[in-house]
Image: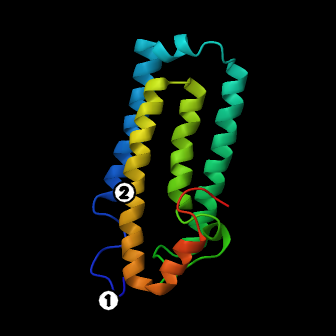
Amino acid sequence: MTEKSSKEREMPRAHLIHFLSAVGIISILIIDVAIFNFSTQVLSFIPLVIRIILCGIALAFATLFVIRAHNALFSDKDEPPSHLVTDGILNQVRNPMYLGILLLHLAFILLTMSLIGLGAWIVVVIIYDKLASYEEEVLEELFGEEYREYQQRTSKWIPH
């Protein structure tokens, strides 16, 4: 980390938040599908093959975003770059790794068609937006006007 920023690049306990979000979504899906079976009854008109296809599409995009973001940011090192990276997938969306994680969660919700899981996913989206906002504040401190210009031309969540 450079001396320009007084904050760490990641929100404190970010790894714990990632872990608990994943465990929470998985637990809710298991409880909904195995115990309550509410969503399956409500959405029973959606064929399994359609749910599998939707899940596969979401998984493919999730994998694409996570791998491309990791390669752009870390390549052969474990430390984040000391310069602002705005090319590749980061030219399309500012938070591709988080977007990939959210799509991964969504893939399993699409497979189960869990309405309760969808509600939990919305909560996880809000949590990830807070994580991304924290990190964007740090990047703005580190890179100033260069980062603000990047924010103006690149969407936070929707790739263009």
Mark 1 = which residue? 3
Furthest toward the top, the residue is 41
Q: Quadrant of residue 6?
A: bottom left
In this rendering, the answer to whether 144 lies above or below 51 is below
Q: Residue at x 56, y 24 (%)?
A: 113
Q: Are marks 2 and 1 in contact (CB under 8 Å)?
A: no
Closer to the chain start, of discs 2 and 1, is 1
Q: Position of residue 112 (x, y in %)?
A: 55, 24
Q: Secondary structure at mark 2?
A: helix
Q: Identify which residue is drawn at 29% across, 75% down.
A: 7
Q: How is the image coloured?
A: rainbow
Left or right: where 156 falls relative to 51: left
Q: Pick the residue in front: 114 or 23.
A: 114
Q: Is residue 134 visible?
A: yes
Instruction: Tell me how far mark 2 sits from mark 1, CA to CA.
Output: 24 Å
- Type of amino acid at the residue the image marks with label 2: Lys
Dot 1 falls on a residue whose secondary structure is loop
The image shows residue 69, relative to residue 81, as above or below, that is above
* Residue positioned 54% across, 38% down in the render: 106
Q: Is residue 83 visible to us here?
A: no
Left or right of 8? Residue 90 is right
Residue 116 vs residue 59, the one in the foreground: 116
Q: Amino acid at mark 1?
A: Glu
| Residue 89: x %, y % from top left | 65, 66
Residue at x 55%, y 73% (from the top left corner): 152
Query: Residue 94 location in percent, x, y?
Result: 54, 66
The correct choice, above or below, for 101 with respect to 121 in the image is below
Q: Position of residue 1 (x, y in %)?
A: 36, 82
